[in-house]
Amino acid sequence: MEFLEGINWGLLAPLFIVQLILLVVSLVDLSRIEKTNGPKLLWVFIIIFVNIIGPILYFVIGRRNN
Amino acid sequence: MSQWMTLFQKEILEMWRNFKWIWVPITFILLGVSEPITSYYLPEIIKSFGGLPEGAVIDIPPPTAGAVLASGLSQYSTLGVLIIVLGTMGVIAGERKSGVAAMILVKPVSYLSYVTSKWAGSLLLVWFSLFSGYLSTWYYTGQLFEWVAFGEFLHSFVLYGLWLTVILTLTVFFSSALLSPGMAGFISLALALVVSIISGALSHLLEWSPSQLTSYASALLVTGELPEDTLLAILISILLIIVLLWLSVFLFKKKELAS
């Protein structure tokens, strides 16, 4: 994997951390909230497996504001 | 005034409760930063996908720092606008639907402070998110390409922020004029899209259109100077924001009194 060696990890690491924060926050919110649009378990999978877009999708459409 | 501050603080607190202060800025950061990174690693990405014949030489000239920053900024006029509209479309319509608005307005709260405090809360969120996202895009562009002057960064930031404020005010307007959040979001998005397309196509006729602010910001980053129509576009945008805000208070009052 010599392709990976040319990457400046110092620059990319903050992005992974930020992304991780997003993931954790959305999971915390999901565990607290009573009801979501659609089944809750589905959202757990979307948040964990869909990279970046998953948590954002959850906040934009999965969350039911009332 | 103190009443307005209370409403405003309630708005800010509510956005903490549903994590808007965390996810909107993070989304803006990820949106913007992905641009300098992908353009920096583009040659390697192409190489690693392979499928090229032996000895093929791909020579992509590295883009200038200003162009990279401008394309990072343009992410906010597409996906950024989508997030802003979807995030604020329920700001008034949702509360009316759930009956919270009626509960608040039973108390001696003026319609003006109710609508403007909601608007100001979302405004703060949008500017904060745009700033953190754009600042990190600027930082990454500086690290991977060249540093763009901070003055140009600030100018283009303000121009973009103004256009996003126009979108936000439009969404608040439809949110208070219509009953359903979904309808408000859809109409605001469609209108923003149509205005952008028309002013892009007829840019020589509509130099004053608020959506031209986005292309002026990019022009500033790429060429280093502001087009002369910028001031007019700024003035029109501010006027539009004030008129829309006043109209949304007016319409909201009328609807509330009627129901």
Image: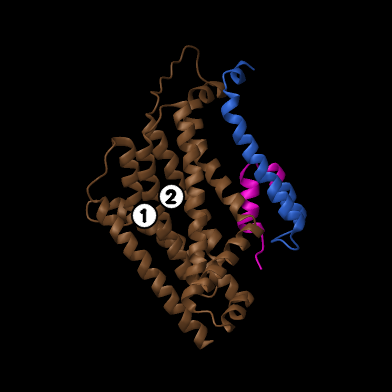
Chain colours: A blue, B brown
Give the camera-side residue of B199 and B76.
B76
The region drawn magenta spans A47-66
- Disc 2 vs disc 1: Cβ atoms closer than 8 Å? yes
Q: In the rendered image, which quarter is residue B232 located in?
A: bottom left
Determine whether the residue tagged by mark 2 lies in a helix, strand or loop.
Answer: helix
Percent coordinates x, y for residue B198 in the rendering: 32, 56
Q: Against B182, is B227 above or below?
A: above
Is residue B207 visible to the viewer in this orientation of the structure?
A: no
Residue displayed at 65% across by 48% down: A55
Question: Which residue bears the numbered disc 1?
Answer: B196
Q: Which of the chains bears the disc numbered 1?
A: B
Residue B77, label in figure: 2
Q: Residues within 10 Å of mark 1 (few under 14, many from 20)?
A: some
Counting every numbered tag in the picture gives 2
Residue displayed at 60% across by 55% down: B20
Percent coordinates x, y for residue B119 in the rendering: 48, 65
Dominant secondary-structure state across the stretch colored magenta: helix
Looking at the image, residue B18 sits to the left or right of residue B163; the answer is right
